[in-house]
Image (spheres, rainbow, N blue to C red):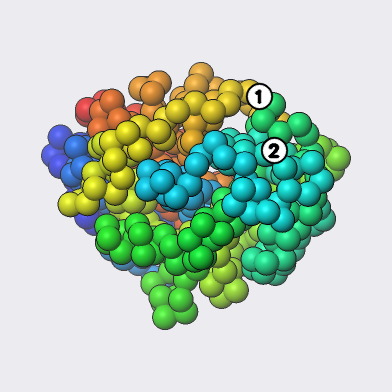
Amino acid sequence: MEVSGYCDEKFAQVREEFEKNFTERGDVGGSFAATIEGEYVVDLWGGHRNADRSLPWESDTLVNVYSTTKTMTFLASLILADRGELDLYARVADYWPEFAQNGKEDILFTHLLSHSAGLAGFSKDFPAEAIYDWDAAVADLAAQAPWWEPGTQSGYHAATQGFLIGEVIRRITGQSFGQWFKENVAEPLDADFIVGVDPSEFPRLGDMVPDSSSDGSIFEQMDPESMTRRVFSGDIDAEAVNSAAWRKAEIPAGNGHGNARSVVKAQTALANDGYAFGHQLLSAAGADKSREVVLESTDLVLLFPIKFAMGYAYGNAFLPIAPNPNSIWWAGLGGSTCVIDKDNRTCFSYVMNQVKSAMVGDERSGSLSKALYQAI
């Protein structure tokens, strides 16, 4: 297996596990990157960016990272709060007046970050084409009533969280989320992460490859009346995700395109007192805010206990993402992950195009995390 990139010799075991992802764990193409004290110690990529393995995964290959995209909306919220433009504990309606319909006038921005606003899905099944229309999506969310009492429990807002946070950001800044992120994070840090891809970039995008070992979506096997099934009823298939329409749209909860290097480059500041790659992205206090606990409950959609900070989650016995219990993280459907560990001043990410039937990581990212911490 040919693997490209850089790996500090102290982390040779990480490289070995990355190679095993291809030789033993079924990866098609992927990347893994890690920083310590703001410097890359690992930046690896390999495999292919398409299912028939005719196109190699290059240094600048980007793929859809699904809900790992959400970490960029959390980071944007923290930056705006640090600048005094957003009060994380303010009412959403203070920024978005139309939101105060159907009993939602007292929902706080932190409820959006902790998936506890009670708006885990749209009022009706939204096909892929419908969620490409930003105005239609946010109008639907503004009009509907909460599914449960806001702030009492989380219920994973799989697709809706990005529209909710993104609309608040749009009301504050006058820019779409993708444009604001580009100008305030991606360009200053030279982080090659895009929400809303220009067609000129399509040639370097990798295709997402569905899980051929699965009997179909894990959500199709659930009770049709369950909240989990309701939230994931519009589960987007590989054909839609690989389409030009999906790639061009801005869906901040799920269609960011990047690789492990760019995810880490954007998120590293939170492990290093707000500083990364020559830029003070936010203050040390602003970066520390990322770990402030908002809610701990059994999630009504994911069906397991979870503790949410400012968007990011903490690991627990059910989800041992990293051995340091103070680490925060989030993951994307199918396998991509991002972990931020301030205690070790470490940030790492795994990004791939072979989708596995798992909601929050699998053995591929887990083996890399274990190897990284053993080296540390």
Q: How many marks?
A: 2
| Residue 154 seen in this snapshot | yes
Identify residue type, mark 1.
Thr
Residue 343 is left or right of residue 330, and the answer is left
The residue carrying mark 2 is 106
Q: Where residue 74 appears, x then y in whole percent?
A: 47, 45
At label 2, which amino acid type do we have?
A: Asp
Residue to which mark 1 is pinned: 298
**Residue most extreme to the right:** 225
Give the quarter of the figure containing the C terminus: top left
Residue at the bottom extreme?
A: 200
Residue 58 locus on image (x, y percent):
31, 65
Q: Residue at x 48, y 50 (%)?
A: 73
Q: Could you say where residue 352 lies in the image, as x and y percent from the top left?
A: 43, 53
Q: Quadrant of residue 21?
A: top left
Residue 228: quarter of image: top right
Residue furthest to the top in view is: 317
Note whether 56 is above or below 330 in the view shown: below
Which residue corresponds to the image point at 66% horizontal and 48% vertical from the top-left? Answer: 93
Could you tell me residue 139's position as x and y percent? 73, 60
Vertical comparison of 151 with 27: above or below: above
Q: Secondary structure at mark 1?
A: strand
Q: Is residue 48 visible?
A: no
Which is more toward the observer, 308 or 69? 308
> Which sits in the foreground, 180 or 357?
180
The secondary element bearing badge 2 is classed as loop
User: Which of 321 and 309 lies nearest the eye of the viewer?
Assistant: 309
Question: Residue at point 76% right, 31% down?
Answer: 149
Sequence order check, earlier mark of 2 and 1: 2
* Residue depicted at 51% across the width and 65% down the height: 174
